[in-house]
Image (cartoon, helix red, strand yellow):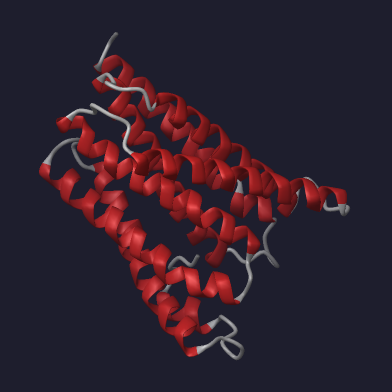
Amino acid sequence: MIGIRDPLIAIANMNWSDSPTIVRSTLLAHAALGFLTLSAGAVAIAALKGGRTHRNAGKIFVFSLVLALVCALPAIIVRRNQFLGLLWPFTLYMVVRGWREAQFIKQGRNETIWIDKTLTATAGISGIGLLGLGLWRLLQGASLAGFAGAYLGLGFIALRLARRDWSSLTFPAKKSQTVTAHMTLIMGSYTAAITAFAAVNFPQDSYNPVLVWVIPPVIGVIAISWWKRRIERQYPV
């Protein structure tokens, strides 16, 4: 996945010689959608929660991120990028489940719908795959401070979040649980978008992969924990 430093600079620096036309076209669209995703997400985070600005920016964030993921898929397949191939369904899971939880805040949840379980199971499989690739790279002699650590860290986050989400799919859920789930999943998907942005703008031949792939998720986890405490204070048991 690709972020924006300057869309034209980021795209121009890529190696296009072996990329089919469809890949080049979809990556151009992905770059533009990535910029829209990051901008709308920042507005939604900063806006008053539940207000019109928050809701409208949130909708733009969700749909632009989903479209950005769709546009990234041809490049992931053509280039056989195993890492992004496993991170892709995990990111899709977070943004779609986060959006669904937003709908449940007002409508309530009366039953477990198959799409929620399917998305959560897919995220768990993605986490297992990331952990497996990380262990495989370690067995091949890779350093834990390199990409192997990034695989393991993100795999652990994916598996842990999927496990928690699966166990929470018992209905009806309290409003505090629904709000917390919405916040956690949407913030997680925004963190994934920021991580993709960092991967493009801080190339791995100049920066340690852990700085690019692990620090944004760590910051995201800290932010999620902070928001979770605020929600718990707002909706005391």
Residue in view at x 48 percent, y 28 percent? 164
Q: Quadrant of the C terminus?
A: top left
Indicate left or right for 56 with 194 as reference.
left
Residue in view at x 56 percent, y 80 percent? 14
For residue 29, above or below residue 160: below
Residue in view at x 21 percent, y 42 percent? 47
Camera-side residue of 87 and 14: 87
Residue 63, quarter of the rendered image:
bottom left
Indicate left or right for 221 with 236 as reference.
right
Camera-side residue of 169 and 194: 169
Indicate left or right for 10 with 82 as reference.
left
Residue 181, given in percent of the width and then of the height, sits at 35, 31
Camera-side residue of 33 and 162: 162
Residue 213, given in percent of the width and then of the height, sits at 60, 52
Residue 174, quarter of the rendered image:
top left
Indicate left or right for 185 with 196 as reference.
left
